[in-house]
Image (spheres, helix red, strand yellow):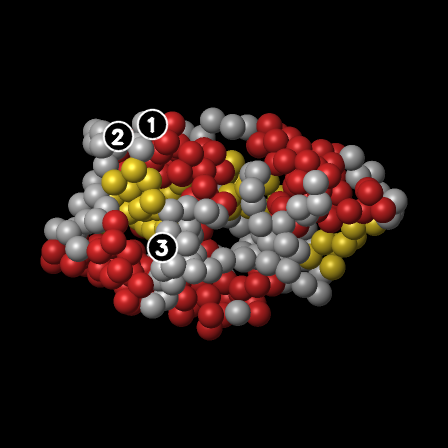
Amino acid sequence: MTDLTGKRVVVTGGAGFLGSFVVDVLRARGVRDVIVPRRRDYDLVDRAACARLVRDHRPDLVFHLAARVGGIGANRDNPGLFLFDNAMMGLQLLEECRLGGVAKVVVAGTICAYPKHAAVPFREADLWNGYPEETNAPYGVAKRLLLVQAQAYRQQYGLDAIMLFPVNLYGPRDNFDLRTSHVIPAMILKCLIARDQGAREVRLWGDGTPTREFLYVEDAAEAFVLAAERYDGGEPVNVGTGEEIAIRDLAHQVAAATGFDGELVWDAAQPNGQPRRRLDVTRAREHFGFAAKVPFAEGLRRTVAWAREARARGAL
């Protein structure tokens, strides 16, 4: 097990959703030298900025969590942007980490990299058994490319680059912008707005039949830090709960948690996305001892409470 307390750690995306919780976990572990680069200072799509980041901070460990992300709508509207930015950030940063002598890099993949019709539960060996679901394929393919890079750099240069594939995350500090948010924050905000305005219906995308697996963000952050401490393998690792829920059932749970008692109306003209998502999480448990701790009902309660408070102070 690697003791991180004396390490200099860079967390790209450390001011974002997952990244901010990874920073919290690192600091709780006693890591004092945590650097959170901001895009205004280091735009990782620019190769020179990646080189400057490594040169300026000389990290021992890099968590690469920065990404251009969004829900189905954002992926559908920005396929080229999501492909280019995510690929270029990762490719260039890993190359500069190699050149700069960084000891270890932990890279965030995405569940979107899995084939559209992957066998359930998704096993890491199935990543290449088909093309991703069309609406988010460019983003997923960009992350597949980073897996190949991490494995190739391990083979040729000995870079200790590991890659985790987290399932859909949710929790406080998530993106609640309805233009770009993922399903849980979008549902929560729609229900809170409807309740506050006395509306009697909430419109939701798709027909509600797909299933998803959700991981509370604090659990995900713990998984990433555990992997940095305990995992040095070249194989990708799923990070999730191993449990799935139908989107229609999710919507009813969100409505109940937010106090919305009106009608949920499904817009089947909008895309469903991937039909099912559920991970095999055996590898994470066996290789670095990760198991999710926060039950979904509790995580949802915390997320709704955070959203309510944010709306009360005008932040949502």
Percent x, y for residue 181? 60, 54
**Residue under circle 1?**
29
Q: Quadrant of residue 269?
A: bottom right
Residue at image coords 75%, 43%:
192
**Residue tagged 2:** 5
Question: In the shown orientation, is residue 150 left or right of residue 184?
Answer: left
Q: Amino acid at mark 1?
A: Arg
3D distance between C-alphas at marks 1 and 3: 33 Å
What's the distance in space between the residues labelled 3 and 2, CA to CA? Answer: 34 Å
Mark 1 and mark 2 lie on one chain; the one further toward the N terminus is 2
**Circle 3 Cα neighbour tier, 10 Å, few/some/many (<14 / 14–19 / ≥20):** some
Q: Residues within 10 Å of mark 1 (few under 14, many from 20)?
A: few
Residue lying at 17% horizontally and 55% vertically, measured from the top left: 100
Estimate the x, y position of residue 120 in percent, counting from the top left: 46, 46
- What is the quadrant of the N terminus in the image? top left
| Mark found first going from the N terminus, 3 or 2 | 2
**Which residue in the protein does label 3 denote?**
127
